[in-house]
Image (cartoon, rainbow, N blue to C red):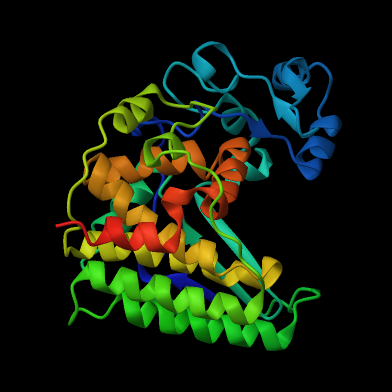
């Protein structure tokens, strides 16, 4: 299998208790089946097993979760912001969500793409402050390709289109606002080849798009309330934001034939940074609120198509504000 990851990926290292915004606070953690089976093998007399059993529950999506403690803290997060489960039975036996975070891993048959998300402050700093265009390292592992029902022809088409999208966004000879407009125009044309895409119908404002029903960090609400319309800066940080969304989401169009929404996410990501405070922390807050809340993310995906303010025409106007 071919393993692909951004060059900054290898530099990520969790800072645990020193983190300014613990990943063990603010959101529910799913308990995956493999971890649950392991917990059943623990002696009943073991304190950590008793604690695990006492906080297991199900959410509205019927996922098995750990019930949060006061202030939305993970029930295993101690006063030093360290994980009692990790300490008691080892990090390899914590839930898969915890072991992988903030990494994302996508298997496409013989190719595995890996990355890190803005939702972690350390990862956000690495992505946002990278001094180079997004580049990748690759290696070949002994692992066999995963079974899949991916349409090979569509996969090649979308992968080639993503390469073109990277080229558009990283073309430093043009101002970034022009690159983002070109990206949206390119994706709109490609979308017509793939599937119908009906835009608009919802008159929700741009600010309301980001007023998420599930609030994880009150600081995000303050960011939304203080949105300031301004021009897009021609910075490498903004380019890296757009590249992040293209890498993380564009190729997933092989499953839903929707490349246009993925391109919109890249442009909107830059607008979030522009309108809500140009910093890695702003992108971290957005990601934690949206990418890691199933409820908020489902709503956002729907609005990418339905919100009038997020149509290609309106986004290009926003991008070109001077």
Quarter where residue 141 is shown? bottom right
Residue plotted at (33% across, 70% down): 181
Query: On the rendered image, what quadrant is the C terminus found in?
Result: bottom left
Front residue (pair 245, 314): 314
How many badges with numbers are in the image? Answer: 0
Q: Is residue 293 above or below residue 134?
A: above
Is residue 140 visible to the viewer in this orientation of the structure?
no
Residue plotted at (34% across, 49% down): 124
Front residue (pair 248, 115): 248
Quarter where residue 253 is shown? bottom right
Quarter where residue 137 is shown? bottom left
* Residue 294 percent location from the top left of the image: 62, 40
Residue plotted at (38% across, 54% down): 268
Horizontally, residue 208 falls left or right of residue 194, namely: left
Query: On the rendered image, what quadrant is the N terminus found in?
Result: bottom right
Is residue 220 visible to the viewer in this orientation of the structure?
yes
* Residue 305 percent location from the top left of the image: 56, 55
Front residue (pair 94, 258): 258
* Residue 31 percent location from the top left of the image: 73, 35
Horizontally, residue 53 falls left or right of residue 9, namely: right
* Residue 126 percent location from the top left of the image: 31, 55
Q: Is residue 6 above or below residue 307?
A: below
Horizontally, residue 215 falls left or right of residue 156, namely: left
Q: Residue furthest left?
A: 322
């Amino acid at each position: 299998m071919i393993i692909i990851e951004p060059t900054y990926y290898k530099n990520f290292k969790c800072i645990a208790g020193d983190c300014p915004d613990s990943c063990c606070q603010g959101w529910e953690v799913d308990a995956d089946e493999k971890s649950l089976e392991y917990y059943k093998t623990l002696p009943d007399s073991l304190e950590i097993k008793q604690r695990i059993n006492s906080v297991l529950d199900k959410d509205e999506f019927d996922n098995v979760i750990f019930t949060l403690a006061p202030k939305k803290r993970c029930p295993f997060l101690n006063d030093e912001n360290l994980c009692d489960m990790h300490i008691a039975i080892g990090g390899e036996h914590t839930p898969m969500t915890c072991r992988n975070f903030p990494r994302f891993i996508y298997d496409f048959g013989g190719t595995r793409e890996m990355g890190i998300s803005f939702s972690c402050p350390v990862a956000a700093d690495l992505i946002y402050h990278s001094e180079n265009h997004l580049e990748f390292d690759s290696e070949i592992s002994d692992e066999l390709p995963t079974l899949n029902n991916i349409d090979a022809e569509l996969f090649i088409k979308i992968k080639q289109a993503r390469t073109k999208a990277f080229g558009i966004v990283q073309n430093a000879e043009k101002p970034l606002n022009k690159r983002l407009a070109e990206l949206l125009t390119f994706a709109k044309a490609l979308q017509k080849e793939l599937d119908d895409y009906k835009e608009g119908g919802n008159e929700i404002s741009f600010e309301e798009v980001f007023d998420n029903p599930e609030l994880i960090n009150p600081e995000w609400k303050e960011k939304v309330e203080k949105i300031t319309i301004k021009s897009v800066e021609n910075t490498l940080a903004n380019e890296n934001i757009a590249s992040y969304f293209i890498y993380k989401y564009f190729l997933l169009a092989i499953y839903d034939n929707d490349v246009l929404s993925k391109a919109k996410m890249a442009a909107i990501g830059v607008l979030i940074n522009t309108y809500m405070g140009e910093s890695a922390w702003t992108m971290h807050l957005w990601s934690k609120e949206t990418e890691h809340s199933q409820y908020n993310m489902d709503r956002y995906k729907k609005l990418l198509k339905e919100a009038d303010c997020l149509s290609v025409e309106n986004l290009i106007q926003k991008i070109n504000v001077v």
